[in-house]
């Protein structure tokens, strides 16, 4: 599974994307955040404010409850500030 | 319907003229241009817009379709830049055409409100003293909420 990071998440993690292989019990976007945050201290800090973490699964906006089983690309980002 | 997510500058006047010229049967066209702003009391040197391009294209396309059906738009275009922009540069343009002005105005407002909260762009301000990410505003969420789901 490819994971993409944008804006301050990308900066805090110091990477724009990575390949990950989460275990089977990682069922949802929220589970994936928890699993990624447990990786190291930088990740724990980057994901600390869970309510500010938005996600997209395979190119569609998702919630923390969205399933990630079989997903190819999961993107994480802060609230959007377009327009 | 046209969606353009681009790092290239665009000419708002030329875009407006082309939009109006190709719109058949409209009685009203509304064009809105967003401009990079630098406040005198808190100046910025540049605005860096990060974008998830594939998702932006998909999100804006979906928002346009929704606007077209709600407000009977005959045509609509969204142009949104990403990359580094300086104050005074056009950042985005929304154009709507409808039989009557009310739908054209409301359609454009609807599109603007949704772009603020639902299009994957992130603004970073480059100031004389450093850089800072622009935080999402609660009033933008409220503006979007008034249109319902």
Image: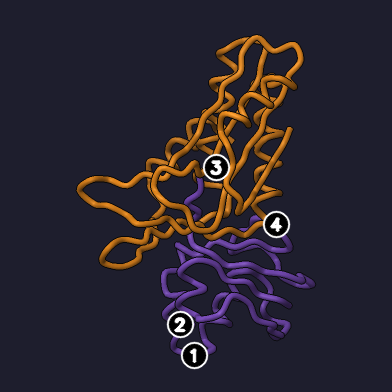
Chain colours: A purple, B orange
Label 2 Cα neighbours within 10 Å, binned few <14 / some 14-19 / many ≥20: some
Query: Helix, strand, or loop for circle 2?
Result: helix
| Distance from the alpha carbon under mark 4 to that under mark 1 | 29 Å
Residue that protrudes farthest toward the right in the picture? A70
Q: Name the chain letter of the residue that bears numbered label 4.
A: B
> Looking at the picture, does residue B5 appear above or below residue B67?
below
| Distance from the alpha carbon under mark 4 to that under mark 2 | 28 Å
Instruction: Residue at 67% x, 29% y: name it.
Output: B76
Residue indicated by mark 1: A40
Q: Contact, CB < 8 Å: mark 2 with mark 1?
A: yes
Whichever of labels 3 and 4 marks the residue nearer the N terminus, that label is 4
Q: Name the chain letter of the residue that bears numbered label 2.
A: A
Residue indicated by mark 2: A44
Relative image position of residue B96 (x, y in whole percent): 63, 25
Q: Quadrant of residue B24?
A: top right
Instruction: Residue at 75% x, 22% y: name it.
Output: B22
| Distance from the alpha carbon under mark 3 to that under mark 4 | 15 Å
Q: Is residue A8 left or right of residue B41?
A: right
Quick check: do tags 4 and 1 share a chain? no
């Amino acid at each position: 599974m490819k994971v993409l990071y944008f804006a301050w998440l990308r900066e805090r993690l110091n990477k724009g994307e990575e390949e990950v292989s989460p275990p089977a019990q990682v069922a949802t976007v929220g589970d994936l955040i928890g699993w990624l945050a447990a990786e190291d201290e930088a990740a724990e800090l980057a994901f600390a404010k869970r309510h500010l973490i938005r996600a997209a699964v395979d190119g569609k906006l998702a919630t923390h409850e969205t399933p990630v089983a079989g997903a190819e690309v999961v993107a994480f980002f802060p609230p959007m500030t377009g327009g | 319907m046209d969606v353009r997510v681009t790092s290239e500058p665009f000419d708002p006047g030329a875009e407006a003229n082309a939009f109006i010229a190709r719109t058949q049967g409209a009685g009203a066209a509304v064009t809105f241009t967003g401009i990079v702003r630098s406040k005198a009391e808190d100046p910025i040197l540049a605005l860096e817009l990060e974008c998830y391009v594939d998702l932006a294209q998909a999100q804006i396309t979906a928002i346009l379709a929704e606007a077209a059906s709600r407000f009977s738009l005959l045509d609509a275009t969204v142009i949104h830049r990403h990359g580094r922009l300086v104050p005074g540069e056009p950042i985005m343009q929304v154009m709507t055409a409808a039989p009557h002005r009310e739908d054209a105005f409301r359609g454009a407002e609807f599109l603007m409100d949704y772009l603020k909260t639902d299009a994957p762009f992130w603004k970073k301000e480059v100031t004389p003293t450093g850089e800072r990410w622009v935080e999402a505003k609660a009033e933008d969420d409220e503006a979007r909420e008034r249109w319902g789901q």
